């Protein structure tokens, strides 16, 4: 057993009871956001449900669910937007909902996101509770709920589904359930390209666990006793079982991402890297953050936009600061690896700069340094803080979705 596995997980019923305050609080915050959206949309003669389910990426996912892959849009500038850029798990689930109910594909996307957001909240609680305790776990969930772009969690997008799979995969790693962690990483890899972050967390933690176990099992001749052979055999058997479990998890983890990327390459006839060509058609790639830095710098060419530039710099600095704090607080290795990859992929992508806030939604471990601090406040004070931020988040989400919204 490793230090990640020493804390036993509660039973399913006990875990649900333990998480109930977090889930109820999360549901209340999301309900507030939806009410604010409905009121704002009605005032502007718009349909709130349409904004949640039938715009931007949600339309692409619905088309995949209904008609499959192969649809593309050719723009006047020569760009090709192919639906192969969208990973298949959400459309598969939308199709499943439609197959077993009278709901439409659009309704299916909303329903999947609704339940996935609750599963994500529970997974975030499980991780934070495991690391910092129950009260901090509740605060972590509520902090995730009141994110300025938290309305995305209620949209027919893949962020909630991915966060749910990622959070529970990380919890499985923390509790030493390697095959489950690998299976969840596989599913996360079928949901979004950033599934690589979950794969990396499983692999890096497993390798570190191998190394730690090998060092712990080094023979100490000075302590040999007559009973040592039997004890050594038992230890070797347990170690072999743990090794097999970790290896299975490592083998399963990358299959989702690798499987879809390779299928796209075969489907397009462009080989293993064909998916990169699909992303290039959307002018999306990884350039180390150069394009984003240039985008921010251009904001300072005029006074009104300079304020937005300052806001972007403060936002990026806050993200980096929270990650550094997590490192200094010695967060568990899988959380640091996962968060580092999610943040790097979000900030260093070369296109769709307006999408970066929602791309950071799955990076929930960034909130963990704040959760214990909030948990140490008196209940009335923490409720006042979270309630105020929840109202602000609900208003901003309604304004945002009725305006430019999440591209």
Image: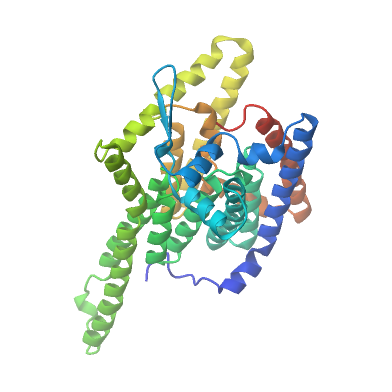
Residue 393 percent location from the top left of the image: 70, 39
**Figure quadrant of the C terminus:** top right
Closest to the observer, 382 or 168: 168
> On the picture, is 222 further left or further right than 403?
left
Q: Determine the residue located farthest toward the top in the rendered image.
A: 302
Nearer to me, 284 or 336 = 284
Residue sticking out furthest to the left: 221
State how many labels appear: 0
Q: Position of residue 164 (x, y in %)?
A: 53, 54
> Which residue is farthest bottom?
226
Please say whether residue 372 is visible from this viewpoint. Answer: no
Return the x and y of residue 127 as percentages of the image width and height. Answer: 53, 58
Q: Nearer the viewer, residue 70 or 280?
A: 70
Quadrant (top left, top right, bottom left, bottom right) of the N terminus? bottom left
Identify the image's colour scheme: rainbow, by chain, secondary structure or one colour.
Answer: rainbow
Q: Is residue 136 above or below residue 340?
A: below
Q: Indicate the position of residue 308 as horizontal and vertical percent values.
A: 60, 21
Residue 126 in view (yes/no): yes
Residue at the (49%, 72%) spot, across then down:
8
Q: Is residue 117 left or right of residue 248?
A: right
At x 45%, y 66%, the residue is 175
In the displayed structure, 126 sits above or below 321; it is below
Going by the image, does 175 lie left or right of 49?
Answer: left
């Amino acid at each position: 057993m490793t230090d990640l596995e020493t804390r036993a997980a509660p039973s399913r019923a006990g875990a649900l009871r333990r998480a109930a305050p977090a889930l109820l609080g999360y549901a209340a915050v999301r309900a507030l956001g939806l009410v604010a959206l409905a009121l704002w949309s009605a005032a502007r003669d718009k349909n709130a449900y349409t904004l949640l389910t039938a715009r931007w990426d949600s339309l692409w996912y619905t088309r995949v669910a209904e008609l499959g892959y192969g649809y593309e849009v050719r723009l006047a500038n020569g760009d090709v937007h192919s639906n192969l850029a969208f990973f298949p798990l959400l459309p598969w689930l939308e199709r499943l909902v439609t197959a077993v109910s009278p709901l439409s594909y659009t309704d299916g996307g909303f329903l999947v996101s609704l339940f996935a957001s609750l599963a994500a909240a529970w997974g975030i609680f499980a991780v934070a509770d495991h690391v910092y305790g129950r009260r901090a776990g509740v605060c972590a969930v509520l902090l995730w709920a009141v994110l300025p772009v938290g309305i995305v969690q209620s949209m027919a997008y893949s962020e909630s589904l991915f966060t749910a799979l990622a959070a529970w995969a990380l919890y499985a790693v923390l509790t030493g359930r390697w095959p489950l962690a690998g299976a969840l990483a596989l599913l996360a890899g079928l949901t979004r390209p950033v599934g690589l972050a979950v794969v990396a967390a499983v692999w890096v933690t497993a390798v570190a666990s191998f190394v730690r176990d090998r060092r712990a099992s080094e023979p100490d001749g000075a302590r040999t006793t007559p009973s040592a052979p039997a004890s050594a055999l038992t230890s070797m058997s347990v170690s072999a079982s743990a090794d097999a479990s970790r290896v299975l998890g490592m083998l399963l983890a990358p299959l989702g991402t690798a499987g879809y990327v390779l299928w796209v390459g075969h489907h397009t006839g462009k080989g293993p890297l064909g998916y990169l060509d699909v992303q290039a058609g959307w002018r999306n790639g990884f350039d180390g953050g150069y394009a984003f830095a240039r985008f921010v710098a251009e904001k300072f060419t005029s006074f009104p936009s300079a304020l937005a530039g300052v806001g972007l710099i403060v936002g990026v600095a806050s993200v980096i600061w929270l990650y550094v704090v997590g490192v200094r607080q010695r967060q568990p290795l899988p959380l640091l690896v996962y968060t580092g990859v999610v943040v790097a992929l979000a900030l260093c992508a070369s296109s769709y700069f307006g999408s970066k806030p929602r791309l950071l939604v799955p990076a929930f471990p960034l909130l963990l340094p704040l959760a214990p601090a909030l948990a140490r406040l008196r209940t009335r004070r923490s409720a006042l803080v979270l309630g105020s931020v929840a109202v602000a988040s609900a208003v901003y989400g309604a304004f945002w979705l009725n305006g430019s919204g999440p591209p």
